[in-house]
C-alpha cells in the first residue's frame, strides 16, 4: 500500500479590499464640484407673469408692450428693429471681456430702463414680451431675464415661437 503524504495548508483569511484611496478621490471630487458650482453667481430673477383674465384683457394698456426677440444664433433685438446683442458665443472663456460683455447685455438694459420710464410717465406698468427660437441658447434666456430684473421690469410674457417663421 502506498502512503499518501498529507500536506498541511494554512488557512487563508477572507480577502479584504482597501478603499481608503477611493474615499479620498470621492471627497476630492465632492470638494471640486462644490467649489465649481459656487463660482457662477446668477442675479435673483424676481419676475411675475401677467395674468390672462378677461377683465384685464379688455383694458388695453396705454403703452404698447415691449418686444424682445431671441434668435437661434443668440442675437437679441428690441422692438423688432434695434439689435441690442450680437451672436452668442458659447466658447467664450469665463472671466474674459467678451464673456462679460455678452452676458451683461448693457444696451438691452438701457433700452428697458427707457421703456420703464416711458410707462411710468403714463402711470402704466411696463410689460415685455420675450419671443425666442426653440433652438436658442438657454443661457441667453437667463441673461435676458437678468437684464429685465436689473431694469426693474416684472411683467414678462414668454413665447417659444420661431421668430424667423421657419
Image (cartoon, rainbow, N blue to C red):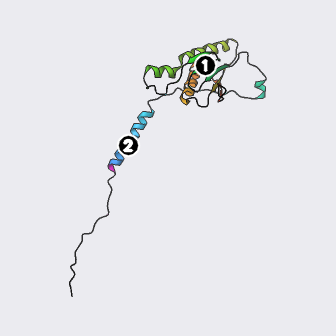
Considering only order in the chain, which callout, 2 or 1, is on the residue closer to the N terminus?
2
In the image, 68 versus 14, the foreground residue is 68
Disc 1, disc 2: CB below 8 Å?
no
Nearer the observer, disc 1 or disc 2?
1
Quarter of the image with the C terminus is top right
User: Residue visible at 73% across and 15% down?
Assistant: 62
Secondary structure under tag 2 reads helix
Secondary structure under tag 1 reads strand
In the image, 91 versus 31, the foreground residue is 91
What percent of the width, then of the height, locates residue 41? 48, 28
Determine if residue 25 is in view: yes
- Residue 40 is inside the magenta segment: no
Residue 57 image-quadrant placement: top right
- Residue 17 is inside the magenta segment: yes
Quarter of the image with the N terminus is bottom left
What percent of the width, then of the height, locates residue 164? 64, 25
Q: Which residues are magenta?
A: 3-20
State the residue position of label 2. Answer: 27
In the image, 102 versus 12, the foreground residue is 102
Determine if residue 108 is in view: no
User: Residue visible at 27% across and 69% down?
Assistant: 11
Q: Specify the farthest residue to the bottom.
A: 1
Q: Residues within 10 Å of mark 1 (few under 14, many from 20)?
A: some
What percent of the width, then of the height, locates residue 139? 53, 29
Residue 10 drawn above or below residue 163: below
Residue 145 image-quadrant placement: top right
State the residue position of label 1. Answer: 77
Amino acid at each position: 500500500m502506498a502512503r499518501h503524504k498529507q500536506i498541511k495548508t494554512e488557512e487563508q483569511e477572507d480577502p479584504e479590499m482597501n478603499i481608503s484611496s477611493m474615499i479620498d478621490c470621492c471627497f476630492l471630487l465632492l470638494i471640486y464640484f462644490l467649489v465649481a458650482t459656487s463660482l457662477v453667481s446668477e442675479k435673483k430673477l424676481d419676475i411675475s407673469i401677467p395674468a390672462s383674465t378677461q377683465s384685464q384683457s379688455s383694458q388695453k394698456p396705454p403703452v404698447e408692450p415691449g418686444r424682445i426677440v431671441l434668435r437661434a444664433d443668440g442675437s437679441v433685438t428690441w422692438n423688432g428693429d434695434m439689435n441690442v446683442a450680437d451672436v452668442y458665443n458659447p466658447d467664450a472663456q469665463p472671466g474674459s471681456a467678451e464673456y462679460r460683455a455678452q452676458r451683461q447685455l448693457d444696451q438691452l438694459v438701457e433700452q428697458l430702463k427707457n421703456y420703464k420710464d416711458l410707462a411710468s410717465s403714463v402711470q402704466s406698468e411696463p410689460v415685455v414680451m420675450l419671443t425666442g427660437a426653440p433652438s436658442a441658447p438657454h443661457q441667453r434666456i437667463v441673461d435676458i431675464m437678468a437684464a429685465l430684473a436689473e431694469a426693474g421690469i416684472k411683467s414678462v410674457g414668454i413665447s417659444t415661437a420661431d421668430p424667423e417663421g421657419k
